[in-house]
Image (spheres, rainbow, N blue to C red):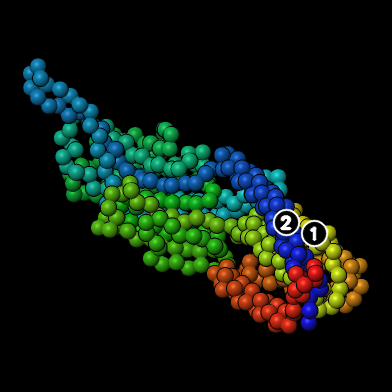
Amino acid sequence: MKAPKNSFWKFALIGLISLLLLIPLAMVKDLIRERSNRAQEASQEVAGSWGGVQVLEGPTLMFSYTQTTGEGDKKTEEIKERTVFPSILNGEYVVDNQMLHRSIYDIPVYTAEICEEGEFIIPASLAKESNLTVMTTIKVGDLRGISGPVALELGGRKFVADEGNLDEVRFHIKPGDLPMDGKDPVPFKLNFSIRGSSSLSFRPYGDETCVKIRSNCPNPSFNGDFLPVSREIDDNGFSAEWKVSKINRGAPREKKIGVSFLPEISQYQQSERSAKYGLLIIVLVFAAGLMVELVGKKKIALVQYLIIGLSLVLFYALTLSFSEFISFGLSYLIAAAMTTAALLGYFRGILKSRAAYTLALLVAVTYALCYILLQMGTYALLTGSLVLFVVLAVIMYYTAGIEEPDLLQQEV
């Protein structure tokens, strides 16, 4: 089978059209990123008034005292501080994840009920210091997220937070209320409610730390320096438990453990991932069109290839537009159906044969395969490579018998 005259130049021009279509495809990708950035801005606005990423630290005992050095005229006084961390810290966090709405955007946030208990052992040397003051502190990532009172029981006495400074909540304690013999434990219990977004973390301040988190988030991502020793995850949420000791912890302020509450992959992430297949779909459809020309002796003009390519690019803008109001899967289906139907009518007008239905079916199957690849995640690359290999094998089979005329001989 001989290829039509001047087919080489047509192949080259169709390749050039494919490259030119990268421009509108890049514009669509920019639009996706722009809409994604707007969604992130809306999320940041909500976090600014609801509560941002929360990192819990404490409680700790902060001792301040005056240390005297030298004698006579060389006598100097210096204010010293010493932090005492819990010997035992047990925490239980119950997290309620929910969605807030800002314009057309859904913003994931949470409310957490915090319950921590444990005990301190205060070194006896602190009892000998002069001008001793004691303050219990806890730190959170964003104080705006604290909802209601912060209640503390320490050494059998009840306290309510009387001061907030930057990211720190303070309780002022009388030194005489605490045993400071280095032996008797000082039990504590801390309760409060906090709001936040994206993630919740804590620092394992205890010599022995055990923390449990329960949440209705079905797709958590555990992060930090230690993974949970046990976890249970299902469609209704998850529960996880961490156990850390000072033996493997190191400096308490340098370690962090927590969980990110991940929503399902956003429509913008899925739209951007699907747009990465844009050039591939264009090349496959153009290749099918060329095969129809070679095998079926039909002619498709260059300007018609351009219009076909533009309709394939518009598909991604349609998907993005619909996905801001309905689910991505349904948006993809509607955009694919609209594009396939429009191209079927166009192919029928151009080819006036059953080949139009074959090309339209190819478009539909290609969109279906791309959607399957989007859902596969880990195996997407392997599956996509195998599909491309099969497609290439089919093209090789049907084009093996094509003979290109001698261009130089034609010119003579």
Neighbours of disc 2 within 10 Å: few (<14), some (14-19), many (20+)? some
Rendered position, 192 above or below 259: above
Image mark for residue 216: none
Specify the quadrant of the image occupied by residue 227: bottom left
Residue sitting nearer the eye, 186 or 301 = 301
State if disc 1 and disc 2 touch (CB < 8 Å).
Answer: yes
Task: Spot the residue most to the top.
Answer: 73
Q: Is residue 316 visible?
A: no
Q: CA distance from mark 2 to mark 1?
A: 8 Å
The N terminus is located in which quarter? bottom right
Q: Is residue 20 left or right of residue 184?
A: right
In the image, what residue occupies the spot 28% across and 58% down? 248
Specify the quadrant of the image occupied by residue 163: top left
Rendered position, 268 above or below 390: above
In the image, what residue occupies the spot 17% across and 42% down? 124
In the image, what residue occupies the spot 43% across and 43% down? 140
Per the image, the residue denoted by label 1 is: 306
Rendering coords of residue 107 (x, y %): 62, 49
Q: Amino acid at mark 2?
A: Leu
In the image, what residue occupies the spot 36% across and 39% down? 137
Image mark for residue 21: 2
